[in-house]
Image (cartoon, rainbow, N blue to C red):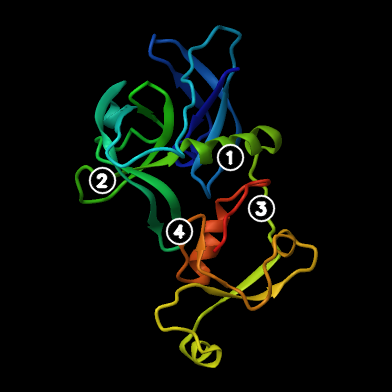
Amino acid sequence: EGHVLTNEHVIARANRVRVAIADGREFDAELVGADPTNDLALLRIQSDETLPFTKPGRSDDLMVGEPVIAIGNPFGFSNSVTTGVISATDRSVQIDEGHSFHGLLQTDALINPGNSGGPLLNAEGELIAINTAIYGGAQGIGFAIPIEVAKRVIRELRLYGEVHPVWLGLEFQNLEPALREVMDLPSGLVGVLVNRLEPRSPASRAGVRRGDIVASLDGRTVKSSQQLFEMLDGTTTGQRLELE
């Protein structure tokens, strides 16, 4: 259908976007929508020609050590291919002082400036992630956005041109030392306290109660309310969340 998935930071502040494909054809593209929180953008090529596409795979069943292939244009060297493995899953990376990404895949397939927005493929050639960032000063530490996250974001961008904020009906506060003492909590317990709950909210219907302590979200340990809010920033409407 002419849709192209890339990173939001690739097209940010661009007045015009052109897409070049491997056979040399170039097309003007329009922006369908962008989501800075998940660093994803959706374009549409303005053409009636038959276009190639990469079949999306799955990222929820990946294992550490699984072989992967990265394709991109590092430093302008178009259609460069590197190989490696999944080094880790569910990584959290701080991009700047105001924002962090959570749930990223880590790979040692070499990623450089120009790889952003390019595909990370499994051994069967299926799209499992979008290459998005490298760890400055390191070698072989790159990060990619899982395709399961991208699928949810794409759906929102196609429908609305943006990702709508998600409302759970919860407010949190950190477990400060004085609060731990009053609540007689074990010293090793990590999490955040639910200090307010909206009636008839998604969280209320799921059985969350005021005074509960949220220890993890989708298997990721929650250490502060700020971290939890950052995790929730990347969620989309209708997504199921597992709380402990």
Query: At numbered mark 3, what does the secondary structure look like: helix, strand or loop?
Result: loop
Name the quadrant of the C terminus: bottom right
Residue 77 in sight from this viewpoint: no
Q: Identify which residue, 137 or 85, lies in the foreground.
A: 85
Q: Which residue is mark 4?
A: 220
Q: Are marks 2 and 3 in contact (CB under 8 Å)?
A: no
Q: Which residue is mark 3?
A: 165
Alpha carbon distance from label 3 to label 1:
12 Å
- Identity, as a three-letter code, of the amino acid under mark 1: Val
Helix, strand or loop at label 1? It is helix
Mark 2 and mark 1: span between their CA atoms? 25 Å
Mark 2 Cα within 10 Å, few/some/many (few <14, many 20+)? some
Report x, y in % for residue 68.
31, 30
- Label 4's element? strand
Q: Residue at x 52, y 41 (%)?
A: 149
Element under disc 2: loop
Gap between marks 2 and 3, in whole Å?
Answer: 31 Å
CA separation, marks 3 and 4? 21 Å
Q: Amino acid at mark 3?
A: Pro
Q: Which residue is mark 1?
A: 153
